Image: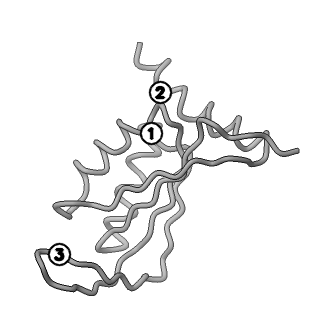
Amino acid sequence: MVKKGGRSRIVLVTCATAAEARRIARTVVGEQLAACVNIVLSPVESLYTWKGKVERAREYLLVMKTTSKRLAALENEVKRLHSYDVPEFIALPITEGSKKYLLWLEESVAKARKNRK
């Protein structure tokens, strides 16, 4: 069955190393800021403009699943842990998906709010 996502988000973050990607993923899942993080272990080649120059880098992609309510806290934690001055942090809405999966996702990050009270 397909359910409209609404509050669910996919967040894309690139990292300089696989070790950095693992550290960020472990932390944000452990703090229940993301329900799940996929780490693409094959490096992606990124081309971008930085300080007026076209740069090229090998990076590791994180695909994080969270909710709109946890997005700001997730972004703050990624910024705190990340080695880049301006880390990529792009949030995309999940418009549809498995009802059970989206419920699990929401429950996985909602627990953090309850536990901190």
Question: Alpha-carbon distance for marks 3 and 1?
Answer: 29 Å
- Report the residue at 27% width, 87% height from top: 56
According to the image, label 3 marks what residue? 50
At x 35%, y 77%, the residue is: 59
- The image quadrant where one finds the C terminus is top left
Left or right of 82? Residue 112 is: right
Name the residue type under label 2.
Answer: Ala
For residue 84, the mark is: none
Disc nearest the viewer among 3 and 1: 3
Query: In the rendered structure, are the residues bearing label 1 and label 2 in contact, judged by CB atoms less than 8 Å apart?
Result: yes
Tell me the CA gap for discs 3 and 2.
36 Å
Answer whether labels 3 and 2 touch (C-beta < 8 Å).
Answer: no
Work out whether mark 1 precedes mark 2 in sequence or the reverse, and give the earlier one. Answer: 1
Residue where numbered disc 1 is placed: 33
Disc 1 to disc 2, C-alpha distance? 8 Å
Residue type, mark 1 in image: Leu
Foreground residue among 38 and 93: 93
Q: Earlier in the sequence, mark 3 or mark 2?
A: 3
Query: Which residue is tagged 2?
Result: 112
